[in-house]
Structure formats: C-alpha cells, structure tokens
Image (cartoon, rainbow, N blue to C red):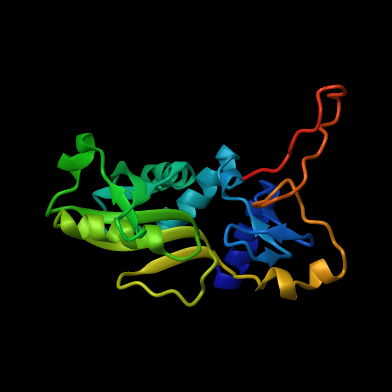
Amino acid sequence: MEAEVLKRISRGIIMRTGAYVTNDHFMISSGRHAREYVEKRLVTTEPAFTEGLGEIVAAHFAASPVDVVLSSGIGATTLGHCVARAHPSRPKLLYAVKGKGKEGETEVTLPREFLPFLNPRSSALIIEDILTTGSTVRALIRLVEKRGGRVVGIGSLWNRHPGIKFSCPFFALVSQNFPTYSRDACPLCEKGVPINTEYGVIVGAPPRRVRGAPGKGPRSRARR
C-alpha cells in the first residue's frame, strides 16, 4: 500500500475515534493556539481500530527480531500491546513509568519486575502513540541502552514533528504537524472565535454551568 494512501486511512481511523478534531479553536499544552487538536486519550478507545493500527506497525517491523515492545503511558502501552500481539517474534510487552529529572528533562523508570526481560541480549521496539517533541522516546532509548539492549525501531501512530530524527528506524502511520499561534498573533482570537472547552488546556477560563444541574452553581467543563 502506498504511503500516502496508508496515511489517509490511518488518519481517517483516528478521526473516527474522536481523537483528531479540526476546524475549531484550541489551546494546546504549550499555551499556544491552534485550529486542530489531537486528544491522545481518545486514540486507543476503539479496540478494533487499535488492533488494526497495531498490526500495521507490527508488519512494518516484522523482519526485525524483537524481544520486547517498550512503551510509557496508558495510550502508548495499549497500542504496544496490539503491536506485541501481532509481531511474529511474539515479544514481551514492557512499560516504563515516566517522570522528571533534576533538570526537568523526561526520565523513565522500568518496574523492577520487568528488569530481567530487558538485558544486554534484548532487542527492543519502542512504541509511542502521539509524538510531539520526542522526549519520551529518547528517554526510552536511553533506558534500553543503559540496560545494554538494542533499539531496533520506533513506531508511532501520529508524528507531530515531521523533521524529527532518530538513530534507528522510525515509522509513523501519520506524520502531520499543524500551525500554532501565540495568543497575541492568533487569527482565531482576532475573529472572536471562542476557545473550545472540551479539548485542550484552558487557563483562566471562566467556569461554565453544566446542563441539567440547576441550583448547583457554576462548574467548569474544561478538560485537561
């Protein structure tokens, strides 16, 4: 299947889960504004779709022997489970816990129960759901290398940073970024388009009354 056709199909599937929303006004985690938004919490909510996408990622790396599939975060681990299940090597699925280092950099820690499975003989396939800066993936690479293992590839559903480079093979079903704007230069703000309060990060938004809850006072529907 041609790469562009595969990209359109994959993007359509992700849109059907409600994870990719466009033609609106959003505030993303950086505080910048955008017309489009990817809600990663929704990407893997449709099991059948997630299994199908995981099979595509697994097929892309099928020629590489894989001992472990490694991820971090609920969404990426759900996808990783589907990739591990479909890969012909029948690898173990491991997940790391994400945190911050002393300098604020992303760090990951592998639960001790998983340590025996990631050793100097291990070939690891790293799985991410939505890749924006690559900081989590780089932390996972460091974890594998610290344990003496080897990263054979990186798979992702959506790459928001098309120019990103890694030292090992990288495959994303969709590679697409979208323009973002500072608040002072946002064309949507200039037109008076209200910020969508169902998706994205809302900072300092006034509380909104929830429908069907009269007499309980205003409550915020802003979602993080």
Front position in the image: 15 or 42? 42
Classify residue 174 by image quadrant.
Answer: bottom right
Task: Say which residue appears at 39% left-offset and 75% top-offset.
Answer: 165
Q: Tell me the quadrant of the picture where the C terminus can be found.
A: top right
Judged left or right of residue 100, residue 115 is left
- The relative height of residue 123 versus residue 111 in the rendered view (above or below) is below
* Residue occupying image coordinates x 13% and y 53%: 121
Q: Nearer the viewer, residue 43 or 39?
A: 39
Q: Quadrant of the N terminus?
A: bottom right
- Whether residue 212 is visible, yes or no, is yes
Q: In the image, residue 154 lies at what x, y percent?
A: 37, 61
Please tell me whether residue 102 is drawn above or below residue 82 in the rendered image: below
Residue 4 screen position, x and y as percent: 60, 72
Nearest the viewer among 208 and 199 is 208
**Residue 63 makes an appearance in the image:** no
Residue 150 picture location, percent across and down? 21, 60
